[in-house]
Image (tube, coloured by chain):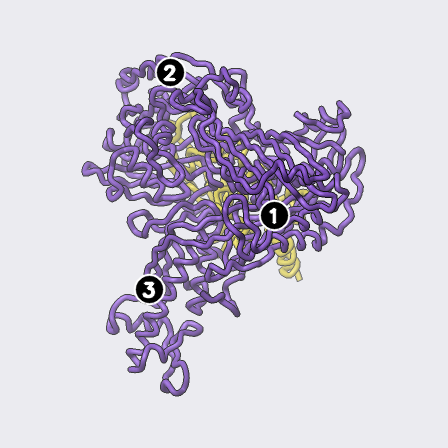
Amino acid sequence: MAKIHVTTTINGEPMEYLCEPSDTMLDALRGSLGLTGSKEGCSSGDCGACSITVDDRLICSCLMLAAEAEGAEIRTIEGMAHGERLHPLQQKFLEHAALQCGICTSGMLVASDALLRKNPNPSEEEVRFWLAGNLCRCTGYDKIVRAVMETAAEMRDGIKEAAQ
Amino acid sequence: MNLVTNNKWIGQRTIRPDGMDKVTGRAQFAADMTMPGQIWGKILRSPHPHARIKSINTAKAEALPGVKAVVTSKDIVDFPIEKGAVMLGIQDMRWMCRNVMARDKALFPGHPLAAVAATTEAIAAEACKLIEVDYEVLPWSIEIEDAIKPDAPILHEFNKFDGKPSNIMGRLEHKKGDIAEGFKQADVVIERTFTTRPVHQGYIEPHACVISVAPDGKTTIWSSSQGQFMVRAMTAYLTGIPQSDIRAIPAEIGGGFGGKTIVYLEPLATLLAKKSGKPVKMVMTREEVMRATGPTSGSRSTVKIGARKDGTITAAHGIFYLQAGAFPGSPIRGAAGCSFTPYDIPNLLSEGFDVCSNRSKVAAYRAPGAPIGAYAVECVMDEVAEALKMDPLDFRLKNAAKEGTKAAHGPTFPRIGYIETVEAAKASPHYAAPLGTGQGGTLRGRGVASGFWFNAGGESSAQVNVTEDGNVVVTTGHPDIGGSRAGIANICAELLGIDYRRVSVIIGDTQTVGFSNLTGGSRVLFASAMVVTQSTEKVIQTLRERAAKIWKIDPEAVKWEQGAAHPVSPNAGQFEPLTLQELADKAPAMGGPIGAGVQLNTQGADGGFGTHICDVEVDTELGIARVIRYTAVQDVGRAIHPGYVEGQLQGGVAQGIGWALNEEYIYTKEGKVDNPGFLDYRMPVCSDLPMIDCIMVEVPNPKHPQGVKGVGEVPLVPVMAAVASAIYNALGIRFYSLPMSPPKISAALDAGMKQAAE
């Protein structure tokens, strides 16, 4: 079967690729696009290690077909930092030791970012339920939840300061 | 060796050296690697739990366009059973060669039968379906009670127990005193039987490797494991390629918890790469991980403890049957050896039985065997304390092991920190806090439990090099599974008196750093700190000699402080300090590069103890138990990087809560795993857990330069008993089997049973 040609935007850059009809978005990212920051833990949408956003919606890229990305706006872990400047969540994960092996970290950060864009002032319960689709086997989630809560607080303060 | 005092970096929450790569998606895990011209390998696996393999015909698979190589057990080096054990660490190569590829019999569903390499994954998978296997399907057993029946189907015909063919592959005992005499002295004796289900290590990264074999046999392995040297040695054994020709490069590892201490894919991918002449990549699916790797043992334990009215334990007896899976080697040593160790018990018999059955070969899981044993022992401890009307922590204090206690598994304890953990638990805000009452149909309870793990030393190597610009590169040989590089950076920077950001820490491959044993047994920071300390001290000695040469004074008259050489006193001469950068700059003229390496078989790893407090809330309508507060107290020796030590405690507790409440292998009537995915194998998710409080007690290990004790494994040991006792406290129902999942709790509540023995 002929490959499908897809034109899309990834982390703000226009991109094109060819994919098999059965390829997932994760296959395309990790394969021809070389964006291996998104990880494959299960291929069934249960672990969240492949979390990306598509038109600002958080999804598991293993559950989306690569061909569906036509015209979409995709964000992955590779687009989270701005040059040398880390996103506050990335910085806070480092400071809090909110990662051990690091395999879930990309997905965890993408999912946390999606939460804070929607809800800049989440309760602990809201953080825990939002991240319930991202498995971490190392940390027991404690430091991850703290890092997200603290980032949210600092980003709110930052916005307040900027407004003053 | 003196303890380092007045620390600047030791004990600080520094940023880990590999952190930036991991928060930006740069870190390369095994499956992230691609080699030029690589093809894909796939495995054909047995659908049967037990079957004799009469023949395998690969002709049709080989003829499929795109297929480049097919291997079967004929291609794997055989280690004949009758020739006796060939040990690599704790693994017998006779079982390893049969585990990576079934020889005469398939012993579990998922057991590899053949492997194919093809230009695409899809073609390789298609080719696997074209392989024709002629089986003689045999009767099978999975559960311990079935496998030890007199008429059970025997997995390994050569094995005899009590003179008869048996699936009991071995027995181990630890003995002290006379238990019959001890039980006679007891006023209270309680005996209970417990069962646990197999649970998987649950690392999020599936096993993966990319392997190239050049025409001259030079082999490069890029894989995710808990030991690149283990990968090299096992691959060498199983393929016949000499170790000197195999470069095993450790990829970043996406979790292991013991499950990546043996090989599954590497020998197969090596043989496929050799046959095809092309680099071969293999990545397991989650289903393959669940069916064919790990999990730990299911178990059946009987524990009897007797105590006097004053709370003194007079005798204890434990019998621990553990599933080994397809090949011998279940962690009976951890179950029988660790479970009673927190206590000074004069009369003790602890027995372990290693039972083979038709499920995947057991793999190490965090303090292997110890959590299984502790679940039984600590629950009975709780019952005895209740019968004696004693506080469960006071009962433990009354019988606590301390300096001078002789443990049944051998050692007489040096200064240990067990009592300190119980006292810290008693004094914790958590233990003092009222439980509170649950809302609408929920009941609350609190439980406590203790645990022990041996910890380990063993072989480690390090190289510490000063760069030309006066910074430092440390190379060690252990995959960093939870932040060990951060601890090493702290130690090296502390000793050199420089900013920790000037110390780069990397994990060497098998051909660039000296032999280093597995990342396992809670040994990595203990052992690597020793070799890194000694290497750094050698570097400092060189730096002092260089300064002495420049100043034309005796090296003994030079001291190293705050990153620079200084004269020890004005008597030695008046010189401006020479910094690390200045000495590095002058190195070519003053004798050459500055660096040192040390290789040791490290000794002196003291065991670790922990005591946990757990509060649960049980929804009596739905049968759901939730942990609402948890405190883990542990003697950590010395927390070199407190953030990653806490992380070990919190992660271990989370795994234990999963084991206690939800996780279990469920088998179909055909003997296949029925829940081989994360949806149905329910590990704790973020919304299942509360914050996990840590109290780090520091009783430094006197045999270690920084006082380090292993910390990674102890925190899983007490958890299931702490949760079980909390549920008992809430409901008045004790569960003698895991997991305490909603259907089981509901059934027990519905039956109105006081004791849900199963």
Say which chain tag 2 marks: B
Residue assigned mark 3 = B467
Which of the labelled discs sits on residue B52, or is there none?
2
Q: Of circles 1 and 2, which is in front?
A: 1
Task: Return the disc, 3 or 2, that comes first in the chain's sequence.
Answer: 2
Viewer-proximal residue among B333 and B683 = B333
Amino acid under label 2? Answer: Arg
Instruction: Provide the letter of the chain coloured yellow.
Output: A
Residue assigned mark 1 = B344
Give how far apart the Cα atoms at labels 3 and 1 are: 52 Å
Task: Return the disc, 1 or 2, that comes first in the chain's sequence.
Answer: 2
Q: Residue B560 sits in which quadrant? A: bottom left
Q: 10 Å neighbourhood of mark 1: few (<14), some, or many (≥20)? A: many
**Residue A117: x %, y % from top left:** 60, 46
**Residue B434: x %, y % from top left:** 78, 48
SS for callout 2:
strand
Image quarter of the C terminus of chain A: bottom right
Callouts 1 and 2 on one subunit? yes
Relative to residue B73, is residue B442 drawn left or right? right
Which of the labelled discs sits on residue B5, or is there none?
none
Give how far apart the Cα atoms at labels 3 and 2 are: 59 Å
Q: 10 Å neighbourhood of mark 3: few (<14), some, or many (≥20)? A: some
Q: 10 Å neighbourhood of mark 2: few (<14), some, or many (≥20)? A: some
Q: From where the camera sits, is residue A79 visible? A: no
Q: From where the camera sits, is residue B99 visible? A: yes
Instruction: Provide the letter of the chain coloured purple.
Output: B
From this view, report whether residue B606 is shown above or below residue B207. below
SS for callout 1:
loop
**Residue B174: x %, y % from top left:** 52, 39
Amino acid under label 3? Answer: Thr
SS for callout 3:
loop
Which residue occupies 43% across, 63% down?
A: B492
